[in-house]
Image (spheres, rainbow, N blue to C red):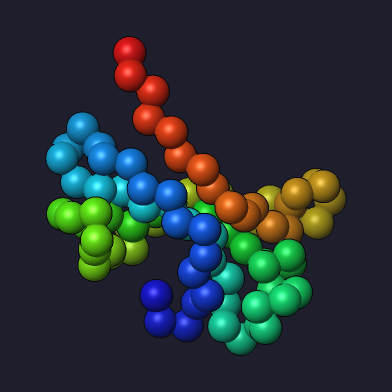
């Protein structure tokens, strides 16, 4: 993603047959450290193959605010698809 550090991708195959990657990202205007601590958010991107390329879709977990213990950094998603 142009202009962002992207880290910690976790991929699951969706019911739509596409691959959905959830990852941490934060602006490259901040250095990697401490950028990931103060500005990371979780995003979702999709691809037709597990190797990609992936296209950005949405921000899933944005910053909630400094008043929360984790409010300035959502980081390191781990996605597990649960079979029903």
On the picture, is 2 further left or further right than 51? right
Is 9 placed left or right of 35 in the picture?
left
Image vertical order of residue 56 relative to residue 44, above or below: below
Q: Does 5 appear above or below 80?
A: below
Name the image quarter holding residue 52: bottom left
Residue at x 66%, y 82% (from the top left corner): 30
Q: Residue 33 occupies which quadrant of the picture?
A: bottom right
Q: Quadrant of the N terminus?
A: bottom left
Q: Residue lying farthest front?
A: 51
Q: Is residue 50 left or right of residue 1?
A: left
Quadrant placement of the C terminus: top left
Q: Residue furthest top?
A: 84
Residue 23 visible from this viewpoint: yes
Note whether residue 62 is visible: no
Q: Position of residue 12 (x, y in %)?
A: 33, 41
The vertical placement of 78 against 3, above or below, is above
Quadrant of residue 80 within the rendered picture: top left
Tell how many labels: 0
Please name whichever residue, 3 or 78, is drawn nearer the observer in this view of the structure: 78
Which residue is depicted at the point 74% across and 52% down?
A: 71
**Residue 28 at x, y percent in the picture:** 57, 83
Q: Nearer the viewer, residue 43 or 62?
A: 43
Judged left or right of residue 47, residue 84 is right
* Residue 31 percent location from the top left of the image: 67, 83
User: What x and y, as percent, mark residue 54?
Assistant: 27, 63
């Amino acid at each position: 993603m142009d202009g962002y550090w992207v880290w910690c991708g976790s991929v699951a195959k969706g019911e739509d047959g596409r691959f959905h990657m959830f990852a941490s990202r934060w602006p490259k205007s901040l250095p990697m450290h401490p950028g990931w601590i103060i500005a990371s958010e979780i995003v979702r991107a999709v691809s037709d193959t597990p190797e990609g390329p992936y296209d950005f879709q949405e921000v899933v977990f944005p910053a909630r605010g400094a008043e929360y213990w984790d409010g300035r950094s959502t980081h390191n998603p781990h996605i597990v698809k649960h079979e029903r």
